[in-house]
Image: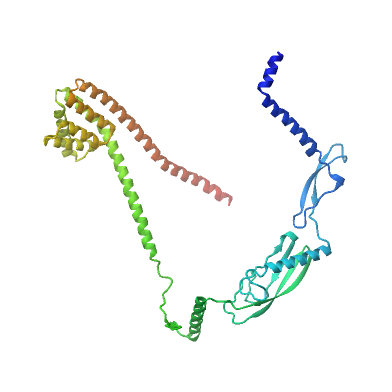
Amino acid sequence: MKKHLKRIFWDNKKYWMVVFLSFILFGLCTLFLKNNTVTDNYISRPGVDEYDAEMEIEVEGLLDKPQRMEIPVSKRLYSESEAKEAIKAALEKALKILPGKNNSLQNVTENLNPINEISELGISIRWDFGDTELIDISGNVYNENLSENTDLDIEATLIYESYEESYIIPVRICPKTLSEEERILKGLREVIIQADKEQIEKDGYILPETYSGRKLIYRFRENTDFNLIWIIGVIIALLLYLREKEREKFNLEKIKRELMKDYPDIVSKLIVFIGAGLSVRQSWESIVKDYENEYRENNEKRYAYEEMAKAYERLKNGTHENIVYKDFGRSCSLRQYMKLASLLEQNRRSGISNLHTLLSMESQSAWDERLNLARREGEELNTKLLLPLFIMLLIVMMMIIVPALLIFY
């Protein structure tokens, strides 16, 4: 018994080791995580840049059993002196960020970057740019038409809780530095604006024919983008190509299925004619003539019989039978027809005595394949019917759900 228990232990020692380690981990967690008594009844607060919180604690000694309760832990607040120091530090940082891409606040040509808070210090900032149209509330600078430097005073109010201080920041807005192209466009626009003002009482005004010694030609931007034409042409050509490929694929599949359906009939007719004592060539001729008579009546072409008719024409022109049968199998491009051509070719070359039996076996196999094809076509038809059924189900569901929802509204 002892040997048996010992063998069980040593064979599964890695599993026992996992169990043992799990008990050790449980003990450590119980020791260090469960008994996390509050030291000196002291609760640490969130910092000034954090948010008020709540903490769940367990109180022992108040009642018979330990009680759980949630207590508020508000974030730490600055003292008055600390608030002043924090506001000064926030102002220095805001003044470094405010110029944005400008070299300084005394040479402002690009947009300013007024930030709304200094999060690490817990200070929020409110900006007042006055009634000027040169700077908006987001700090965007509109100095395109400015002809000379303009001095402005920006008011920054730094806020901490209920304590706030305001500062006036002097800013000089300078005319925007224009490139040669921008300068020319601006000059032309000013000329056009002046022409518009001078002829304001007329039905329209005349655009300048020249500017800076250059003859100008104007066009309306509303003109149609003709690039769309060739883009649409390329798309249509691609769609037509794909449609043609899809049509070819569909036609090939249609011909393949037609060949599969006609194959059992052709083999059965060969069996009947050969069994009646006709040769393979005479049987072939009889099948072709029967097909031609049917075609005159219903005008319906069948691909397999058309290939047989072409092969019969070659036989009449003197082509060797073996070559005709082989080419017939290749033109149909199906395994069944190639097998039939091989049987006929072997019969012609070496004289198979049991050709009738082999064709009978092939006929049975052909009818089985035709039955499987009919099953597949039925499954495909059922799949195609699923979409209309789903649409009908959706319509019925909408007829039920919509009135129900309207009742609630």
Q: Is residue 98 above or below residue 8?
A: below
Left or right, 296 with respect to 11, comes to left
Note whether residue 208 is visible: no
Left or right, 168 with respect to 384, comes to right
Figure quadrant of residue 325: top left
Front one among 300 and 45: 45
Left or right, 181 with respect to 92, comes to left
**In the orientation shown, which residue stands out farthest toward the left?**
317
Residue at image point 77% right, 57% down = 48
* Residue 200 drawn at (x, y percent): 49, 84
Q: The N terminus appears in which quarter of the rendering?
A: top right
Figure quadrant of residue 217: bottom left
* Residue 322 drawn at (x, y percent): 18, 31
Residue at image point 36% right, 62% down = 229
Front one among 103 and 28: 103
* Residue 93 drawn at (x, y percent): 72, 66
Note whether residue 219 is visible: yes
Q: Is residue 202 above or below residue 52?
A: below
Query: Colour mode?
Result: rainbow
**In the orientation shown, which residue stands out farthest toward the top?**
1
